[in-house]
Amino acid sequence: MDYSIKELESKANDIRVDIIRMLEHAGSGHSAGPLGLADIFTALYFKILKHDPKRPDWDERDILILSNGHCVPVRYAAMAHADYFPKTELLTLRQLGSRLQGHPERLRLPGMETTSGPLGSGLSQATGMALALKMDEIKGRSVYVVCSDGELDEGNSWEAAMLAAKYNPGNLIAIVDRNNIQIDGPTELVMPLENLRAKWEAFGWFVLEINGNDIEAIISAVEMAKAVTEKPVVIIAHTIPGKGVDFMEHDFHWHGKPPNREEAKKALHELRTLGGKIRSEHQ
Amino acid sequence: MHLRHDWSEKEPIRKGFGRGLLEAAKFNKNVVAACADLTESTQMHLFANEFPERFIEVGVAEQNLVTIGAGMAAMGKIPFVSSYAAFSPGRNWEQIRTTIALNDRPVKIIGSHAGVSVGPDGATHQMLEDIALMRTLPNMVVIAPCDSVEAEKATLAMAKDKHPNYMRLAREATTVFTSPHTPFEIGQGYVFRKGSDVTIVATGTMTFQALTAAKLLANKDISADVVHIPTIKPLDEEIILQSASKTRHVVTAEEAQIIGGLGGAVAELLGEKLPTSMIRIGIKDRFGESGEPEELLKHFGLDAEAIAKAAHKLLTDHTNHAH
């Protein structure tokens, strides 16, 4: 189905609503990252990815790796909206026996391409996947990997960046969620990442920089990335952590906690009445 | 068990891996390999020269080594990833845990140059904790072949196994005493010598020492059952219990920390199912040091004499106790 940008924006808002409901119900989990990533995951699942929810192991599908596994509520919500599993299952997040583990596990949930949580290993797995496709001379399949900015503190990320540039598999697109926060505070205080663009360029990557909460920008960046074959491509997606919920936006304290009942009520009210357009309202 | 009678030939165990990998790659085009800047040392050069398009050189980056492997395995490849055991799984255990073991991907992790017999390089490079590290991981198979011929067979078996595997290899030339007809199956232990007074359970480089110890013991009219355990996990419990119930005395032998190693595994088994007097030969909660391999093995009590002495002590203590 071909969605309009407006429909995709509305879908992203529905996904944010589900993220809040899931986290409030679970009583633990991460709020800011998943909310900030809702537009990217909406664009991926409803516009960009070649996939089939009825055949999660379809051998022609694109691969999506979520490296920063703690943001998995956004992926669960997007997958449920894409009919990988019933939306009612979303409220089992983090419960005993649930397929929706606190951090994603491939073996539990069809369509979950890998198990992740400990940071810094997604880019290298994606690189391995992309290289395997290249070895088999398979065209028309892409490997996407979403990483957080904070996880770029991990050396494993840069080991992978070097390797991907060396072999240039030609089918690898990394998306860095540049939301500027991590558990202990702003990234530039915890461990400065800037000049992030120059870092990736120095490692041999082609860099695109976009507003990661702008669905149109996300889609056109991926189109552009697909046209670049001389280097692996990283899209530095500037996002607002907690996007769509006023009291969460930009506040690193919301990195690793869920809303309580009152907060969830307030957040849901905002999302339902403002549709996540807080900035435009403030402007 | 079709063991060789001639014990004059020696070859590093890792050489068998190199041959096995090349052979496996010829049978199966999905066999791929990656190495962290130790291609020739780990004997992966045979594969890399023959199949350059299926070989990835990751540089000195062991975390990347295993996670690239996890990625390739996800796409249907059977990746063999090699380095020294001190670095892989020494450096990258969490990546192995999450992306390979919990993820149940058939990555074949090869840790070469394990044990004190690495010699002059010293403690940093003498990996002794790898068995313990890998044995605690669910889904992981842990293999320590006793000579190059068995390493070759183990490599071929690993290429067919659908789960994560770890294989530890040694640097130094080791006596070749198994033959192409000696059986090997993942998860299977083998009685290499039949005896009735004492059981010696050994793995890796120490199995040959165990057989030699059995000869020494025979000179003193002590009959030793030598059980070779090439697969430390899953452990062939039955073969150990059978032997232990017959002899009631068990010596374990490995070139690794006895805490969490083969000695640990056998003690756990016997402690629960058949409490038996035992002595664990191996490294006893300390690090290695520089020296010549033979010298170090003797220094740390990892030779046939030490095993025979332990067996003797078990039997003597028992006799004294009984009287």
Image: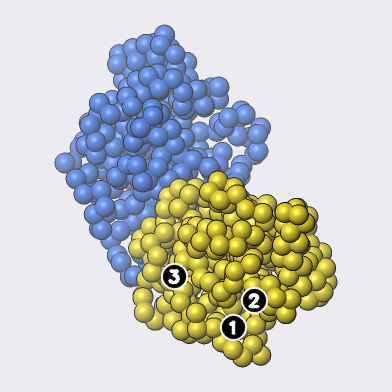
Chain colours: A blue, B yellow
Secondary structure beneath label 1: loop
Report in which chain the residue with disc 3 lies: B
Q: Residues within 10 Å of mark 3 (few under 14, many from 20)?
A: few
- Asked if one can make out residue B180 in the rendered structure from this viewpoint, the answer is yes
Residue wearing tag 3: B185
Of residues B1 and A160, the one nearer the viewer is B1
Quarter that holds the C terminus of chain A: top left
Q: Nearer the viewer, residue B297 or B44?
A: B297
Q: Amino acid at mark 3?
A: Glu
- The answer to whether B5 is drawn above or below residue A125 in the figure is below
* Residue at the spot 64% in from the left edge and 57% down from the top edge: B263
Q: Is there CB contact under 8 Å for labels 2 and 1?
A: yes
Q: Which disc, if any, is residue B211?
A: 2
Q: Can residue B66 be seen?
A: no
State if disc 3 and disc 1 touch (CB < 8 Å): no
Q: Nearer the viewer, mark 2 or mark 1?
A: 2
Lower position in the chain sequence, tag 2 or tag 1: 1
Most foreground residue, A33 or A4: A33
What residue type is disc 2 on? Leu
The percent position of residue A184, horizontal first and vertical second, equals 62, 29
The residue that mark 1 highlights is: B177
The quadrant where residue B175 appears: bottom right
Between discs 2 and 3, the one toward the N terminus: 3
Q: Residue furthest left?
A: A1
